[in-house]
Amino acid sequence: MAVSKEALIRKFTQAIREGNAGIFAGAGLSRASGYVDWKNFLRPLAKEVKLDIEKEKDFLSVAQYCRNESGTRGSINQEILNAFNAKVCENENIEIIARLPISTYWTTNYDKLIEKELERKDRKADVKIDSDQLSNILIDRDAVVYKMHGDVDHPASAVLTKDDYVLYDKKRSLFRTILKGDLISKRFLFIGFSFEDPNLDYILSQIHAFLDENVAEHYCFFRRVQKTDYSKDEDYGYEKAKQDLRARDLARYGIQTVFVDDYSEITEILRDIEFAVKRNNVFISGCADDYASWGRDKAEGLARKISEFLVKDDFKITSGFGIGIGSSVINGALVEIYRSKYRHIDEYLRLCPFPQGIKDVAERKNVFTQYRKDMISDTGVAIFLFGNKKDPTDSSRIIEAPGCWEEFLIARNNKNVIIPIGSTGFMAKRILDEVKANMDDYKYLEKYINVLETEVDVDKLAKTVTVIVKEQRMAE
């Protein structure tokens, strides 16, 4: 059955947050990088055996005919090397899925796009190509990439012909076993997949036979059949009806179809998923050498309370360990983590203390700027409070912290939800004034701006901030 884009974004985002999301990539995902689809891959091979690829539907048979006629796999192996070693273009879809905090990737593609993009995102990929690699675990891996049909560097063992599929259980049966487990326990998003692969069809059928309707829910994209694709109305009607039947058939296996009118919509949906995932990660910016009328205990109580409330509602806190504020942010998070989150500290708290001992001023500034960008890049909400420090040239003088302003600019550029607690004064007040001057960009704060500007009650402020953050998570 078909599901809406909004439902997909909400449900798959939740699966990512819960740590049970997976990506299954087909040939369509790699096409934007410049690689050919299966039809065009087989075109030169079909020509060798005097077949017109435009008239063929069963591409497995075409590959098998080529293997039969040549007597060896040599021509097939060479074509794999030629087709999947070509220079590639940027592919935003792959960039996004590599950035998402997902640890399980399956693909039937031979190319190396996924693992290379993971590496570019500083994520260590444990790539599984052969069955004997499945029992080995790469230390400190961030993701596992299962290449169930082989890899371009090993064309002789790539799965392509009918014989390869027949022998799959003998040579790669463990891939099927692991995939069954993942399809039962995780929620997959299929991208660029046509569902014409016999292997996946066999696996899905087995799961359905064992579990009947108690299967996990997965999602796939189909480009909706367009009337402009056909010269005759009856042809359009036939193909549309057939596509609807296909979507209902996939629903038997728990795979829900998301229809798009154009493939560019897939990129937009992936962007929205990434944005929604980030909104569960909250950056708390603030430092204080002077607490002004608040006093130290009350100021630390506010930071602690905000952090505690957010963790209670399953948000993850990122802190740069700002002077006078950072320790309270950490303490508040830890209180709730130890109380109700099974002590899973890494799931709810990310600490990013700034590098120390850099004496060169210019180098220090550059390092800190890049560090701030990296720290904020994975967050979707930024909360600002206080923001002052001692003047480096006169320790008796308190100034607004320029680093706090830079974090605001980075967060704004990152399209974070901005929440300045202006009543704490200093740089937080300056940020709130900036927000008030541009309220059209911060409409989500309209009914809360007065509270953020004037309220000094710790509980009321902490609750207000939590409400804003929760509303924006719901608005995804």
Image (cartoon, rainbow, N blue to C red):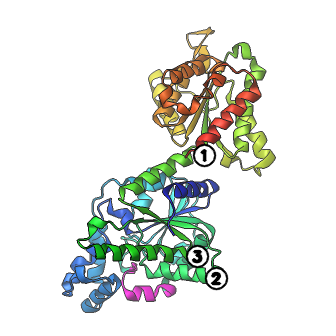
Residue appearing at x 37%, y 70% in the figure: 153
Residue occupying image coordinates x 75% and y 35%: 331
Quarter holding residue 401: top right
Q: Position of residue 27 (x, y in %)?
A: 37, 68
Q: Does label 2 or label 3 sit earlier along the sequence? A: 3
Residue that badge 3 annotates = 180
Distance (Cα) linking label 2 and label 1: 36 Å
- The residue drawn where x is 23% and y is 71% is 231
Residue flagged by tag 3: what amino acid is it? Lys
SS class of the residue under badge 3?
Answer: helix
As measured in the structure, the alpha-carbon distance from the residue carrying label 3 to the one carrying label 1 is: 32 Å
Q: Which residues are magenta?
A: 157-170
Dot 3 alpha-carbon crowd within 10 angstroms: few under 14, some 14 to 19, many 20 or more: some
Query: Disc 2 versus disc 3: distance between alpha carbons?
Result: 11 Å
Is 161 in the magenta?
Answer: yes
Q: Is residue 129 visible?
A: yes
In this view, the residue in front, 422 or 308, is 422
Tell which of 354 and 318 is nearer to you.
318
**Residue drawn at (72%, 20%), measured in percent from left and top?**
456
Residue located beneath label 1 in the image: 474
Q: Residue lying farthest right?
A: 339
How busy is the neighbourhood of tag 1: few (under 14 within 10 Å), some, or many (20 plus)?
few
**Residue 210 numbered mark, or none:** 2
Q: Earlier in the sequence, mark 3 or mark 1?
A: 3
